[in-house]
Image (cartoon, helix red, strand yellow):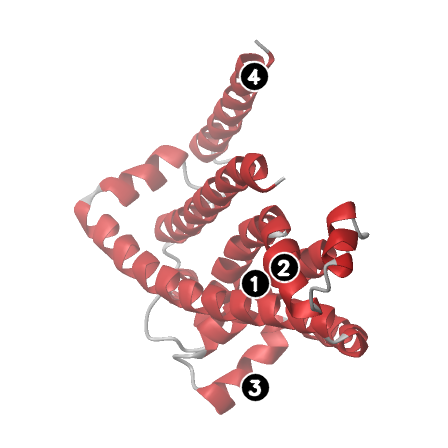
Amino acid sequence: MNTARGLGTSVLGVAILLGLFEAVGRTGVAGETWPPLSSVLAYSVDEPGRVVLARATKATVAEASAGLLIGVLAGVVAAGLGLLVPWLRTGMSQLAILLSTLPLIALGPVLVTTVGNERTPAVIAALGSGFAVFVAMSSAFSRPATDLDDLFQVLGASRTSTMVRLRAPAAVPAFLDGLALAAPAALLGAVVGEWFGAPRGIGLLLVSSMQNFEVVQLWAAALCVSAVSLAAYGTLSGVRRASVRRFT
């Protein structure tokens, strides 16, 4: 009953938001830069717009996926090293915080000159996603010892064996938490990276739309990447909820 009521409230809220979007566009109170939602959806469905959005989204998702993979691997390895080699933990945390505070807009030109404009989106995506995974895994690995930890110590298990057989499986829900946050961060990083001269992608489409005052195309691109981000977050959140029953 409560679940159905919550779902109904969410649907009602979304419907009101979409209705306001359409009303503002129809009345023109926000000017020419706010088109009706129906016009944005019509552009996204019609063949020319659909092809443009599909091509750009495919490129951005590919860059974000590559960055997400790199970021996840880096975050897990860094958190694992912090657990296995305690004196590295503080340095790893400080490095992760430093990288997360770097302004992406300022970092972009530096990356373009070092790794090239085609690799910049994936690198920025990796920086954004890696921090989320590192924080989640570090938190999971540093939780207080349980009776099972004591049992492993009594049985003479090494620190590596304890991590692989006990802490890593127990950290799966936390890992999926971090992954659910890392996926949207990777998409955002890829879009920002594409602003710096990438040959294709949603970021390039956004810049092109702004320069040519293609307002409907601009909104369609923004809504498209937002929908992909929400879908990724929702899917991974669902996987995380299912994993709780298995690993906790």
- Residue at 19 percent across and 51 percent down: it is 48
Q: Are marks 2 and 1 in contact (CB under 8 Å)?
A: yes
Residue under label 3, please give it: 110
Q: Is residue 17 above or below residue 105?
A: above
Quadrant of the drawing holding the C terminus:
top right
- Distance (Cα) linking label 2 and label 4: 29 Å
Relative to 110, 196 lies left or right? left
- Mark 1 near mark 3, Cβ–Cβ under 8 Å? no
Q: Quadrant of residue 95?
A: bottom right
Residue tagged by mark 4? Answer: 3
Of the image marks 1 and 4, the number of the one nearer the N terminus: 4
- The quadrant the N terminus occupies is top right
Q: Secondary structure at mark 3?
A: helix
From this view, report whether residue 235 is shown above or below residue 99: above
Front residue (pair 173, 228): 173
Given this view, does label 3 or label 2 mark the residue nearer the observer? 2
**Mark with earlier residue (3, 4):** 4
Tell us which disc is closer to us: 3 or 4: 4
Three-letter code for the amino acid on which mark 2 is drawn:
Ala
Distance in Å between CA atoms under marks 3 and 4? 49 Å
Q: Provide the residue designation for mark 1.
A: 129
- The residues tagged by marks 3 and 2 sit, at their Cα atoms, a distance apart of 23 Å
Q: How many marks?
A: 4
Q: Judge by depth and name the residue closer to the eye, 171 or 44.
A: 171
User: Circle 3: is it few (<14), some (14-19), or many (20+) Cα within 10 Å?
Assistant: few
On screen, 34 above or below 140? above
Q: Which residue is mark 2?
A: 132
